[in-house]
Image: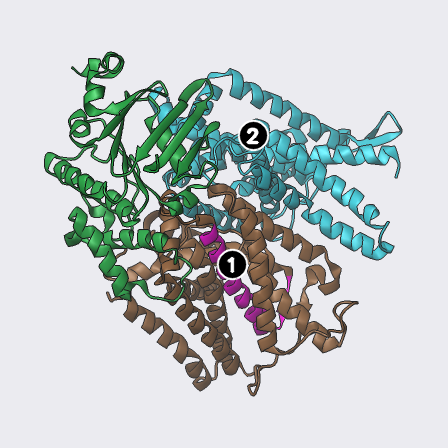
């Protein structure tokens, strides 16, 4: 039973140490697995920002994860094939990871602005469904658009290039992802303690009150939605580089569900909750997957028990003061 | 493009829509009456299809297979409601989404455990496997026609059930005011179980009917579930009439989109690109339809409440 | 006439066949507490919603400081200087008491797009929040969770939020409902003090409170203003006695 700050620190320390241990014991697969945990954590942190703090249950965050992934895949594949991207532009794509991140964030923000602008007019279950619908729209588009592999997906063979740093080395790539995790944790911590953060949390509980003190909740929610989409989108970009492959499954509703499950498993509205959720999720996948082919059956059972009996998430199991 | 081909596609759209209605009816009632988002509704569709395939294999009778699908999904629905669902009616949407998402995992993996990973096949009975002739030289499958008829008959029965019978009045009372229904002296718990199981049974029947055209496999329910959500959101959650109109709209938009858009784009592009652009947009068409409806009517065509 | 802060001109709103507000005209002047009384269902709460923009009128106009606000959104009206309290306490239960006031101050200062400054370390904001909390006597409860407050304290917090907005006019919807004598008295004194900052439109059931606090009173019945005047004028008014006071005395 410890304080939340301490627990957060321990989580980060463990994540920091694991790849060194993996190197020491010559288990490169463990590094890849931890990289996956970190990337899913980033995606979850993005969703948690609006879901946990703003009360906006988006069931379509795979849209951003997937677009980030496809932007990365498409830019890289053009660079590798030296094919022009647009017939009117002399542009061959890029394999510079810094540039790719920038483009992923810009495009995901823009898509989030569009989806958010229309979705946030609705609320409750309609919001859940319209976000799902937008993600499905993109999913089916990715399947039926043949130029980038359609249903079969798109391979990029080598990771994109970071200046002075070999991204093909698993530990190097891991620390790139880990740095992004730290960056987003820091940014969100600052935002959540700011005026904007306070208003966002107020929107979750009482929009009428927010209106009556002269603030338009729609504006607050839309800005948060864009932030959230950009963060999850960057996670998607990293995911493509991790796997050197992207396919429509990153846009699927199962992906949205997975991100949501790890946010809720970890503990909603706790900044580090999604990390614990991702750790737990991957451990379950690996251990149950080793024991039984039908590991998802047991995952389902665990989730149901968690919903029925341990609602505050895994974070709260470790913490002294259970937040209301 | 001939007129007969066009009408045939319209009929296909109608058949698709009617099937979606069977899926959506339960979903919309469960949300309207109990306020529950049930992602696991697609699992009942799958259970129905598997039950039908099993009983068709055992008895050789298509009729018995259909009844089995209805009964199996009815029982699965009742059991799920009694053990898990009734505990989460009062929870927020987030808990409901999570719990029913987990139920999908349970059902899918459970079925995979019992039946294995390979798809099963359910055959159309001989008496319905042929086609028949309609005016304008249209030749149409008897089986698909039967689906349309079954769907319309069930829609009519549901309409009378809701608007003319005691149970329907109770359901309506429950939609308008959940406290009120208790005050009327209605046994709410029992009513909820009945509505939930009936919805599940209709989904099971839909799964069996479609199982004979497509294959019966794990995961067959989820794509249809998402379409059913699109339907009830377009129609307005809680409204049976909305579900019917929404289902036909979605069915026809999807079918006609796939049919017409590629030839539409061939006016602007060469054939290969027209086909790829056309089919890409066609696959998104119903989601575009849904987004458009929600932008103008945030609670659907026949929806009153926005929650 | 330059003293009129809020002017309501011929305002109407109906729900289906029921006329909730019919051709209502009112003027709220500087330095006054203007009480709105009338039986249940007379249209008082509807009128508050129309003024604050949570409902839209069918016809008629609303002016704040001689500028028309009839078609602005609730948040725009709040920014122009309308502060309200809700009939049922509408505070942020998950926030501490002082966070509720900070939230209102963020709205007033329009710095909700500040993503960087840590509000927990902002001394100026804290000082300002405490200034208002002291006015309603909630400074000792500043760090408690709003949901843990008693009913009376929640009402005070609700009023404190409105005061901290430093508006041009206050609309208080039954602020004293369910309060004990001591708390009512405190709020009574508070209202006498703050009416000099901005006039108060007060909906109140308790006649003693109305008569001791109000400078003018308007009586609403079936969505219509049937009388407006000073307390003594209203007490003498025969129509009022018949429809409203008659049932009380």
Quadrant of the rendered image containing residue A20: bottom left
How many numbered discs? 2
- The brown-tinted chain is A
Residue in view at x 26 percent, y 43 percent = C158
Local packing at callout 1 (Cα closer than 10 Å; few below 14, some 14-19, many 20+) is many
> Considering depth in this image, is B134 or C151 the residue closer to the camera?
C151
Disc 1 on helix, strand or loop?
A: helix
Q: Give the range drawn in magenta.
A: A219-247
Measured as percent of width and height from the top left, residue C7 is found at 38, 33
Q: Is residue A221 magenta?
A: yes
Judging from the image, mark 2 belongs to the subunit labelled B
- The residue wearing badge 1 is A226
Residue in view at x 47 percent, y 29 percent = B195
C11 displayed left or right of B230: left
Say if A68 sits above or below B22 in the image: below
Measured as percent of width and height from the top left, residue B231 is found at 60, 37
Say if A166 sits above or below C246 in the image: below
User: Can you name the residue that lies furthest to the bottom here?
Assistant: A164
The overriding secondary structure of the stretch rendered in magenta is: helix
Q: Which colour scheme is used?
A: by chain
Say if A238 sits above or below A250 in the image: below
Chain C colour is green
Mark sitting on residue B302: 2
Between disc 2 and disc 1, the foreground one is 1
Judging from the image, mark 1 belongs to the subunit labelled A
Residue in view at x 23 percent, y 15 percent = C237
- The cyan-tinted chain is B
Local packing at callout 2 (Cα closer than 10 Å; few below 14, some 14-19, many 20+) is many
User: Can you name the residue that lies furthest to the front here?
Assistant: C1
């Amino acid at each position: 039973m410890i304080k939340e700050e301490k627990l957060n620190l321990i989580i980060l320390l463990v994540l920091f140490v694991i790849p060194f241990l993996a190197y020491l014991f010559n288990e490169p697969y463990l590094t890849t697995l931890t990289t996956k945990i970190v990337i899913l954590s980033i995606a979850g942190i993005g969703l948690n920002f609006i879901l946990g703090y703003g009360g906006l249950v988006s069931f379509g965050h795979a849209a951003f994860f997937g677009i980030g992934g496809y932007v990365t895949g498409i830019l890289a594949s053009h660079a590798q094939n030296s094919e022009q991207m647009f017939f009117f532009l002399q542009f061959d794509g890029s394999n510079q990871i810094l540039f790719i991140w920038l483009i992923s964030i810009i495009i995901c923000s823009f898509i989030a602005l569009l989806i958010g602008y229309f979705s946030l007019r609705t609320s409750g279950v309609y919001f859940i469904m319209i976000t799902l619908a937008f993600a499905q729209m993109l999913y089916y588009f990715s399947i039926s658009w043949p130029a980038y592999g359609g249903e079969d997906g798109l391979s990029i063979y080598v990771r994109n290039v970071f200046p002075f740093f070999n991204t093909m080395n698993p530990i190097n790539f891991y620390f790139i992802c880990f740095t992004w995790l730290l960056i987003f944790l820091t940014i969100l911590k600052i935002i959540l303690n700011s005026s904007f953060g306070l208003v966002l949390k107020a929107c979750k509980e009482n929009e009428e009150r927010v209106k009556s003190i002269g603030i338009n909740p729609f504006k607050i929610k839309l800005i948060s939605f864009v932030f959230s989409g950009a963060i999850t989108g960057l996670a998607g970009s990293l995911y493509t580089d991790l796997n050197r492959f992207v396919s429509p499954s990153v846009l699927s509703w199962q992906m949205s569900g997975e991100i949501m499950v790890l946010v809720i498993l970890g503990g909603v509205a706790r900044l580090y909750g999604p990390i614990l959720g991702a750790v737990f999720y991957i451990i379950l996948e690996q251990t149950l997957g080793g024991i039984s082919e039908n590991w998802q059956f047991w995952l389902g059972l665990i989730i149901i028990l968690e919903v029925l009996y341990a609602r505050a998430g895994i974070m709260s199991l470790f913490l002294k003061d259970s937040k209301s | 493009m001939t007129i007969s081909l066009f009408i045939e596609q319209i009929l296909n759209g109608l058949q698709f829509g009617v099937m979606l209605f069977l899926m959506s009816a339960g979903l919309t009632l469960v949300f309207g009456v109990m306020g529950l988002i049930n992602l696991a509704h697609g699992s009942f569709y799958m259970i129905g299809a598997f039950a039908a395939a099993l009983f068709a294999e055992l008895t050789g009778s298509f009729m018995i297979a259909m009844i089995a699908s209805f009964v199996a999904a009815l029982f699965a629905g009742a059991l799920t409601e009694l053990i898990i669902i009734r505990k989460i009616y009062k929870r927020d949407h987030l808990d409901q989404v999570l719990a029913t998402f987990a139920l999908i995992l349970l059902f899918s993996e459970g079925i995979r455990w019992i039946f294995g990973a390979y798809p099963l096949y359910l055959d159309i009975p001989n008496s319905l496997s042929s086609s028949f002739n309609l005016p304008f030289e249209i030749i149409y499958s008897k089986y698909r026609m039967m689906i349309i008829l079954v769907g319309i008959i069930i829609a009519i029965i549901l309409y009378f059930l809701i608007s003319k019978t005691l149970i329907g009045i109770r359901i309506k009372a429950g939609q308008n005011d959940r406290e009120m229904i208790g005050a009327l002296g209605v046994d709410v718990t029992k009513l909820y179980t009945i509505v939930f199981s009936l919805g599940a049974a209709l989904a099971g029947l839909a799964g069996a009917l479609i199982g004979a055209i497509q294959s019966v496999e794990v995961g067959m329910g989820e794509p249809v579930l998402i379409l059913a959500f699109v339907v009830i959101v377009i129609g307005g959650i809680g409204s049976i009439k909305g579900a019917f109109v929404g289902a036909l709209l979605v069915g026809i938009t999807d079918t006609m989109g796939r049919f017409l858009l590629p030839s539409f784009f061939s006016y602007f592009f060469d054939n290969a690109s027209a086909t790829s652009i056309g089919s890409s947009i066609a696959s998104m068409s119903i989601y575009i339809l849904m987004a458009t409806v929600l932008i103008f009517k945030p609670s659907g065509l026949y929806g009153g409440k926005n929650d | 006439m330059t003293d009129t802060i809020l002017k309501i001109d011929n305002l109407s709103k109906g729900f289906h066949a029921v006329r909730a507000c019919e051709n209502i005209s009112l003027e709220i002047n500087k330095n006054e507490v203007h009480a709105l009384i009338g039986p249940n269902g007379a249209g008082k709460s509807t009128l508050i919603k129309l003024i604050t923009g949570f409902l839209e009128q069918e016809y008629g106009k609303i002016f704040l400081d001689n500028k028309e606000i009839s078609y602005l959104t609730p948040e725009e009206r709040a920014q122009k200087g309308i502060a309200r309290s809700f009939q049922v306490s509408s505070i942020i239960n998950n926030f501490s008491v002082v966070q509720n006031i900070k939230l209102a101050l963020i709205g007033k200062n329009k710095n909700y797009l500040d993503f960087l400054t840590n509000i927990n370390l902002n001394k100026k904001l804290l000082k300002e929040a405490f200034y208002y909390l002291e006015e309603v006597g909630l400074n000792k409860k500043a760090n408690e969770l709003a949901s843990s407050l008693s009913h009376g304290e929640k009402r005070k917090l609700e009023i404190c939020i409105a005061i901290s907005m430093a508006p041009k006019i206050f609309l208080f919807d039954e602020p004293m409902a369910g309060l004990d004598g001591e708390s009512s008295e405190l709020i009574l004194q508070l209202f006498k003090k703050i009416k000099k900052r901005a006039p108060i439109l007060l909906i109140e059931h308790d006649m003693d409170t109305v008569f001791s606090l109000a400078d003018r009173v308007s009586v609403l019945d079936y969505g219509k203003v049937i009388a407006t005047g000073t307390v003594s004028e209203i007490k003498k008014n025969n129509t009022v006695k018949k429809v409203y006071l008659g049932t009380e005395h």
